[in-house]
Image: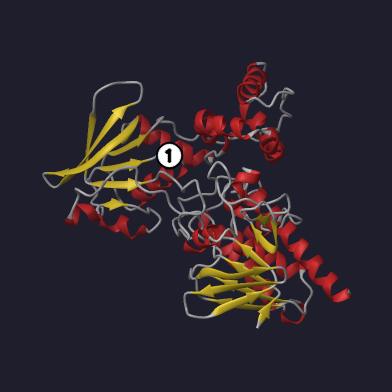
Amino acid sequence: MVYDVAVVGAGFSAIAETANLLRLLPPWASIAVVGDDPGFGRGTAYRTELHVHRLNVPAGRMSIFADEPNNFVDWLRDQKREVPPDGFASRDDFGRYLRDRLASLLRDRDNRPTVHFIKAKATACDQCTPGKLVFQLDNGASLHATNVVLCLGVGNADLPADLSSVKGVLRERIVANPWRLGWLSHVQPSQTVCILGSGLTMVDQVLALRAHGHRGPIHVLSRRGRVPHAHATRKVEPVVPALPASREISMLLSALRKQVRAGPQWRGVMDGLRPLTQSLWQELSNTQRSRFLRHALAWWNIHRHRLAPDVACQLHTLLDDSTVTVHKGYLQAVAENANRLHLSFQPRGGTGTHKIEADWVVNCTGMERAGIAHSPLLRQMRSDGLIAGDDLGLGICVDANSQVVDCDGKTQAGLYAIGALTAGRFWEITAVPDIRVQARNVASLISADLRGSVDT
């Protein structure tokens, strides 16, 4: 069978694309959804069942449908969840919402395209020509489609240290992927935990540890030792940023700081900047983008990706009573000694070596920046010249319509990518409000192409 569209992936990008295809494609069309994750659509972020894990975007901006902004809030109300539009729902609730929205679309069998869910992983692309794309699957089958949307996301970043000297039981206490939550049940209440990374994932794991009864000390080590800021407890209106004509990063940052010093809340300025971020990013030269990633990214992350107010309150209570201690420095080594893990690090701005002793080490350094290394499929496609990595290693090259660009700079007809894979082009493309727009746009393009081919 040759499908009209194949969606490759199983996380949020895949469910957003599938939902939009179901709404926009003609009823005679056919869709294949290829992924081996049993929690389809929930991905890493929305699979958690802990209520302490909260969204960091208000519920009123989390609808899966760009043209129905209240869809998630309405669903929460129907589920008797009292979360206002400016409140922060649990990620578990959002994951259930995604599955429910997809299920409701699938129930309308008479007025939707045919959908086949294929539990497999795409491992290679055998053919990539206009009108025909062929992928090999790890179950031995092949997939034929006229359009393919890559929704593969990114992988978990590797631990920034050589662990070869750590063996046996202690090696099992180094958690490479904290979202495999089984490790939490093995942590004793009084044991010492060291978390690498100080961003949103760190906060999630600190709260998960507390929810599981852990009361021991927690050390946090990151290069800059900065934790995310909180959303305001009251609504802050967006403020249009006063941007200079220059697209030098230093000039842009200077103008934003000057505006905040003049009176507007920084949260309002950041929120006003949000609708402009994608276009602003595309106006930057590669040199300026690189400067941003080197010098401003850490500050961008803590101001842009903020915590729900009550989550921030819990975190700061733990910081204030020294249950959680944040260190800033560069990890040098992890070794074992006397049945404990010893972490050596160089303090930022200092000399010498400091040490942390811990019973557990948890990797919360985030997701890998490049979206190619974790995927055998993408590595093969890059090797064959079917895709190209963007210059800064943020993902793969796409055009303004999210159509994949090959190693010669030519767009690949019928081959699209959405979500974090396209960060090199769009930058702000990892959050729900951005991905849902991209998913709708790609679905609209494919729908128009299919209808046009029938008319001709």
Kind of residue at badge 1: Gln
Residue at which label 1 appears: 314
Residue 301 seen anywhere in this rendered image of the structure: yes
- Other residues around mark 1 within 10 Å, as few (<14) / some (14–19) / many (≥20): few
Q: Residue at x 42, y 33 (%)?
A: 316
Element at label 1: helix
The picture places residue 450, in percent across and down from the top left corner, at: 79, 71
Using the rendered view, name the quadrant where residue 263 is placed.
top right
Residue 303 seen anywhere in this rendered image of the structure: no
Q: Quadrant of the N terminus?
A: bottom right
Q: Is residue 197 left or right of residue 346?
A: right
Front residue of 139/84: it is: 139
Q: Is residue 192 left or right of residue 207?
A: left
Q: Is residue 199 above or below residue 397?
A: above
Q: Residue at x 53, y 74 (%)?
A: 136
Q: Is residue 405 left or right of residue 93?
A: right
The picture places residue 413, in percent across and down from the top left corner, at: 72, 63
Colour scheme of the picture: secondary structure
Q: Residue at x 53, y 67 (%)?
A: 40
Q: Quadrant of the C terminus?
A: bottom right
Using the rendered view, name the quadrant where residue 80 is placed.
bottom right
Q: Is residue 242 above or below residue 132?
A: above
